[in-house]
Every structure is written in C-alpha cells, then in structure tokens.
Amino acid sequence: MIVLKHSVRGWGLVLCITLGLTSLLRTLPAGAQTAAGTLSLTLKQTERLFLEKNLELLARHYNIEASKALVQQARLWDDPTLTTDQNVYSNHKWFEHGNNPDGTPKGQFFIQVQQLIKTAGKRGKQISMAQTGVDISQWQFTELMQHLKFQLRSDFYTLVQLRSVQDLYAEQDTQLDKLLEGMTAQFNAGNIARKDLLRVQALQISLKQQMADNLKQIEDSQSELKTLLQITDDTVILPVAEADENTFPTISIPALVDTAKQNNATYQLEQLQVQYQRQNLAFQKALAVPDVTVGPSYDHNSNYTPHYVGLGLSLPLPMLNGNRGNIKAARWQVKQEETNLSQADVRLQNDVTGAYRKYLYTRQLQTSARQDFYADYKKLQENIAESFRQRQISLLEFIDYFNDYEEVRTKQLQLQLDSQLAREELNLQLGADIF
C-alpha cells in the first residue's frame, strides 16, 4: 500500500501515479481480454476437460496395465530346460556319427529335458502377490485422481473468488472515478480543499494497488488450472460459478469414518500394504521348501546299452540356508505395516472428524440472516457516495464506509471460498462426493 504524507507538495504527483497504475492495470489480464481468447468453463466442463487431457493420469493408468501384465506373467509356468551333449571330434573326424563296418554304432550324444516344479504353492502365492500389486496400482491411480480433483476444484473456486474480488475493486474504482471527477471540478472552482481531493486520490491509489496484487494471484491460479488442463497458449480461463446446492445430508461421524475407510485411497493403500507383506511372508516360508526339477533323458551309445532312456530328479537339501533371514525380515515388515495401518486408522478418524466440523462451521456462518445483511450493506454503500457529494456525511465518514464495505465484501467472498474448500477437503477425506 502506498502511503501519502501530509508534506505532499501538490496533487499532480498523485494524479500521475493514479494514471500510471490505471494504465498498468489495463495491460494486465482481467475479466475482459482483447489479445488472448477467453474460455468460459463451468466446474463440470472443467473436470471433463481435465479427464480428457491430464497426462499424469494417463501415465498412472499405464502403470496399472503393467501390473496386470505381471499377474499374467506369474500365472505362466517356467520354461523347460534342454540339455544336450555330443562328441565333436574323435578319430581325426568332426561330428563322427553313424555305424561301424560291423554294424555297431559309433559317436555319442546325450539329450535331456528338465522341468522345474514349484512346491508349497509358490506359484499361487506369486499370483496372489501380483494381483495385490494390481490393486495397489489401481488405488494409487484413485489416490492421484482424488488429490488432483481436489486441487482442480480448489483452483477453480479460488479463481472464482479472486475474480469476484476483482469485480468488487473495479466497481469501487468506477465509483471513485465519478467522485473524483466531481471533486476535481469543485476544487478548480475553489469549493473544496486540496487535502480532501488528495485523500480521495490516495484512496484510489491504494485500491489500484490492491487490484494489481489481486491480478497477480489470478495469474497464479490461472497458471495452475491451465497446467492441470494441459492448456499452453494465451487462453484465459473464465470460471463460470454455479449456485451451490443447499442440500446437506445428515450423517453421523462414525458413518462418515466407515465411508472413508471404504473409499479413501490412502487408507486403502495402507491396508493393501499389510496384505502384501503378509502374502510375502507366506511366500518366503514357501521358498524354504525345495523345488523339484524332473525330466527324461536319452543317452545314445555311451552306456551299458546303446539306447539309454532315464528319468532325472533333483532338489536342493534345505540344510544350510532355509531362507531363514528373508522369513525373519518378512515378519518384521508385516509388523511394520500393521503399525502403519493402526496409525492410518487414527489419522483417518481425526481427519474426517476435523474436516466435517470445519465444514459445519463455515456453513453456520452462511445463514440467511447474514445474506440479508450483505444485501442491505450493499444498498447502503450505493448511497454513500451520493450522500458525500451532497455533503450529508463528512470525508472521514465516506472513507470509513468505503473501506468497511470493501472489507465486509471481501470477507464474504472469502467465507464462500472457505466453505467450498472445506467441503472439498471433507469429500477428499471421504474419498467420495458425499457433500
């Protein structure tokens, strides 16, 4: 805010600053744009455009498909192993095979096919872990969706509020323009003192500085919203506010907590982490059970019979390893995730309760009596400037009314935003648009 001291030599400097700020504000993006296009969007249209263009959601969707492929992989059997051995060089000949003159075979080769057979249900346990991995990916996608949706709506409502504040400032600026036009004529006629003109000029300078600061916040909200919507050109988003529904479902806090436990993605992920670690513990225990490798073999001309057919069987002896370290680590990981789940349960209950009470508080502040007060106060403000021009009130009274009206209206708009954000925070905690 620019503060003017009583030692100002003349009101020409004030007028120059005012004109400069006015010129600056006209070049900044506001509700009416000339160079850039304007895209008017309701909240539903904004969300639909967001779902169509958001690349982060698309990338997370690919992760779900990758997890599903891992389930398919876990269902597959291990490939068999082919082993062969044959003579390469003997009797000064390469790859000597066939029969001797007396009809006996010469040359040797060996062929064996082996198949790994997993025991203790390892394959089924791997499939279960992979399926849990898919569930984790899907809830991670849902978690991202819930938070981006909250961010999108917050930016939308914030932009609505900032533009409403800008409209308020523009309305007051127009009022001051008309007032200053008349005061300047009165000053030139010698009917009012210079200090009165300077006070109103200073009031307008302060207002224009607030307009400039508010426009900066609008630009920040525009940038965030355009990033979510993947808009990179000079298009200006004009959010179209719709009347909020007055319906308020009567739900107890325990019922809200139960709803949150079913839909809150962060809480669901904690539950899935416990499930995954328990599955991992069962899998680590199964790894302690040896797998069996079995397969037929054929040995030509290198045994007691020229055509030997055998069956091979092999398995490791669980004497030294037993996967004991991994089993112990898996047990501790289960305890860790169970502790995290208990903490998440407490946090969720407190977050839902806190969000619900904040929403109730903001709704209570928006009673019909308060709305009537705002309407009456607006009518009063419309008559203040005229009362001042007719000298029914003093300059100090006019400035007090002017500043009080601005403060009351901005607080009203902020309260509307707080109520909308509190509602969206509650829906975020619940994981569903209950309110």
Image (tube, helix red, strand yellow):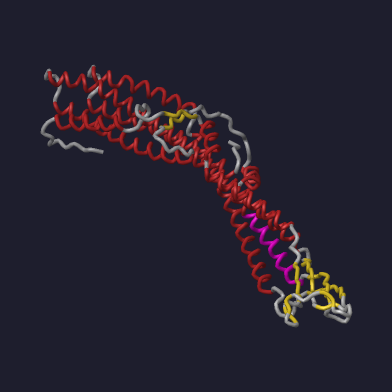
Residue 263, compared with residue 121, is above or below; it is: above
138 versus 193 height, above or below: below
Q: Nearer the viewer, residue 226 or 71?
A: 71
| Residue at 22%, 23% in the rendered image | 180
On-image quarter of the C terminus: top right
Answer yes or no: is residue 186 visible: yes
Residue at horizontal 63 percent and vertical 38 percent from the top:
251
Picture coordinates of residue 241, whole percent (x, y): 47, 28
* First to last magenta residue range: 270-290
Between 367 and 317, the one nearer to me in the picture = 317
Of 160 and 341, nearer the camera is 160
Residue under the image location 74 percent in, 56 percent down: 75
Residue occupying the far front of the picture: 101
The verdict on residue 287 being magenta is yes
Q: Is residue 148 left or right of residue 117?
A: left
Count of numbered circles on the image: 0
